[in-house]
Amino acid sequence: MTLLLLILSLFLKSSSCQLQCSKEILDDKEFSISMTDHTTAESGDCIWIPFNLTFPKNKVTPPYKKIWFKEDPQTNVDIQVVDNMKLESKNTFRINGLPRGEYEYGFKLEWGCNQTYIFPKRLRIYVSELTRKPIVRAYPMKEGQAATLTCRAYRLCSGRSKVHWKWTKADGQSTVQHDYDYDFHFHFQRGREISRFHLTPKADDHNTNITCVAEYNYSIVTERTVTLTVEFPPQILNGSQCVVEGKLLVCVCISRGNPLPPITWPFASLTEYSVISSSSIQTVNSTFTMPAADYLNSTVKCISSNGLGQAEIVIPIQNYTEKYGLDGSQRFDANLPWITAVSFSLNLILLTSLIICAYKRYKNMQKVPCDREENNTYASLKKADVQEEYTTISPKPK
């Protein structure tokens, strides 16, 4: 009997619950939401949507839920539970940043046992690319002196930024700076996060680009690039030289520095010379020209200076002592190759003539017959007897 009463009690409770959870037929005229139907924002921005609700409070009783969904009513993005209608806060929907794109949101109420009302009105949000960029402070630097760059990145509603620095050198190669020679300092100031980059610049860092990159949630990235200005004293470059071209002494001096370092040639005693100078970026090119015979030294001095220092170099004159003596006159040695050539030619002609004469004499001697020599010998032998015979005979008188 007791068991039967227990079963009956459970059945009655179940039936009562089913009656309470049965969905009511709702009138759309009793439900309305007042809000904008579209709005715009930038990537990562906080989006605030105020709205007002009208609903039958005799039917929708606490506790009930105010729910925002995205695209599909089953995709809830914000849920607020109201336990006491008198303590209900203002109706505001907040979205903590979105990436670039178009989005649609809707609103619904849930109360009682499986009671739901979905409002037909929709909110459309158009999100554009983030245009706010970090603010980078970079002041003129001096070579070898410690300097600091400051980057202030906006703190977006989507979350804090992750800041890193990217350095593009003169050769175009970019490197992400993450090693020991710098450190970051973060703090919040007026909704911005501050990062500091410490470096000791070199002359080659002048006119290079450094970029502050801020990364946020939803793959939102923004950056700003600045060009470094590094001041450095003059440096005389290897292309500086002096040469003798014909009768002219031509010297070229090339210097690099920032600010531009003018070039001077310390020739106070000279009057006949010319200097042509040109500059490009941080390089100065100066050309000095004068008659070679008027210059008595074997070296030339070039001086370059700016507000940070001075550089000078003593440039040797290439091949100077081979063509000119220390007194500026042209050396006799320069004509030695010509004299040698002429002397060799004359000796060759003379030797050839002697050989030809000797050959001709030899040929003439070969033309006399051999028996003639024998006859001469013989005749000379016979000549003594004849003379001796004729000396004993006296001539007859006429």
Image (cartoon, rainbow, N blue to C red):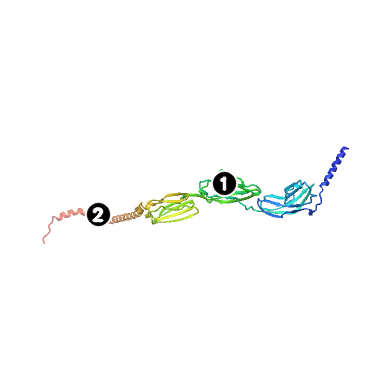
Residue linked to disc 2: 373
Please give the name of the residue rendered at 37% of the width and 55% of the height, measured from the top-left corner.
294
Residue farthest toward the front in the current orientation of the protein = 86
Q: Give the image location of residue 133, x and y in percent.
A: 61, 51
Judge from the rendering whether residue 383 lies leftward or rightward of residue 280; answer left or right: left
For label 1, count other residues whose C-alpha is less than 10 Å away and answer few (under 14), some (14-19) or many (20+): some
Give the position of the N terminus as an image quadrant.
top right
Q: Give the image location of residue 99, x and y in percent.
A: 66, 51
Question: Which element type, helix, strand or loop, lies under badge 1?
Answer: strand
Q: Give the image location of residue 135, x and y in percent.
A: 59, 50
Judge from the rendering whether residue 35 lies leftward or rightward of residue 234; answer left or right: right
Number of callouts: 2
Residue farthest toward the left in the current orientation of the protein = 397
Please give the name of the residue rendered at 22% of the width and 53% of the height, measured from the top-left corner.
378
Judging depth in this view, the residue of 57 and 102 nearest the camera is 57
Judge from the rendering whether residue 81 lies leftward or rightward of residue 258; answer left or right: right
Give the position of the C terminus as an image quadrant.
bottom left
Question: Could you tell me the amino acid type at mark 2?
Answer: Glu
Please give the name of the residue rendered at 44% of the width and 55% of the height, measured from the top-left corner.
287
Residue 197 numbered mark, or none: 1
Question: Which element type, helix, strand or loop, lies under badge 2?
Answer: helix
Judging depth in this view, the residue of 99 and 146 nearest the camera is 146
With respect to residue 303, does 9 lie above or below? above
Question: Could you tell me the amino acid type at mark 1?
Answer: Phe
Q: Give the image location of residue 39, x and y in percent.
A: 69, 54
For label 2, count other residues whose C-alpha is less than 10 Å away and answer few (under 14), some (14-19) or many (20+): few
Q: Are marks 1 and 2 in contact (CB under 8 Å)?
A: no
